[in-house]
Amino acid sequence: VLGQTTKKFTWLIFFEENSGSEIQKLTDEIKRYPFIEPITVNGYKEFQIRLSGLIEERASKDSKFVLTTRLDNDDALNKNFIMELQKSVITPIHNKVLHFPRGLFLDLGERNRLASSYYPLNQFVSLLENKEKELKTVFCSEHDKWENNFVVDSVGLKDAWLQVTHGKNMANRFKGDLVFSSRLKGVPVNKLLFGVDYNFKVLYYRLRKHKI
């Protein structure tokens, strides 16, 4: 989020109350950035109850619409994600769901792997709403299950998001076509180490797949 090319947004990061001294150090660090705000809640139920009100309080008075996006704490965004998302709202429509179907999966382990994937209505989905109506926010539905009264549209940004799979995250699985490590250049994350032969293995995989 810190690496976004535009800073014209507010990002709320939610923490559990009494999370410990390490989290306190992190929230103190976050407060240095005016567009990011840490908020503590007592469990997911309180998060659901307070979310709409917190967003209404922080929404610009000059805008009739609010755009909310979800991001898990172990994933990342392409540096142009928010800029392209905002640009896509040419004609605001209430209850419009916006999603970037193309992104990357990163498998962290003894040997890191990277894959490109086409994954519509993924965890990085956004919801556009009219402020004059009762705000539901993007958390009103599971990311891949939107009812008929929502308008769904996609945004065409390559490698728009980075979803991380690892041993502690059993809900997600690594999927897609293996790609070279250089594809990470659009996602501002800390430098990752890939095996010295990783890119050669990707080249071999792609040659076999296309039978060249």
Image: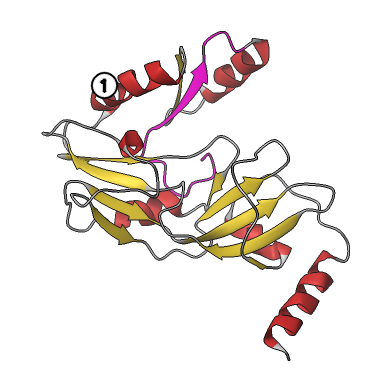
Nearer-the-camera pick, 59 or 178:
178
Which quadrant, please, contains the C terminus?
bottom right
Say if the magenta span includes residue 117.
no
Position in image of residue 131 (x %, y %): 16, 35
Which picture quadrant has residue 169? top right
Say if the magenta span includes residue 13.
yes
Which picture quadrant has residue 44? top left
Most common secondary structure along the magenta stretch: loop
Q: Residue at x 41, y 41 (%)?
A: 7
**75 displayed left or right of 134:** right
Residue 74 sits above or below residue 107 on the image: above
Q: How many marks?
A: 1
Judging by the rendered image, the residue that carries numbered circle 1 is 53
Label 1's element?
helix
Q: Residue at x 61, y 21 (%)?
A: 26
* Residue 111 shows up from this direction: yes
**139 displayed left or right of 101:** left
Q: Residue at x 58, y 49 (%)?
A: 163
Residue bounds of the magenta highlight: 1-19
**Structural crowding at the residue carrying mark 1, measured as other residues with C-alpha within 10 Å and reported as few (<14), some (14–19) or many (≥20):** some
Residue 86 sits above or below residue 37 on the image: below
User: What amino acid is found at the position of numbered circle 1 in the picture?
Assistant: Gly
**In the displayed image of the protein, which residue is found farthest to the left?**
132
Residue 195 sits above or below residue 108 on the image: below
Position in image of residue 9 (x %, y %): 36, 38
**169 displayed left or right of 207:** left
Nearer-the-camera pick, 129 or 43:
43
Position in image of residue 198 (x %, y %): 82, 65
Position in image of residue 133 (x %, y %): 12, 34
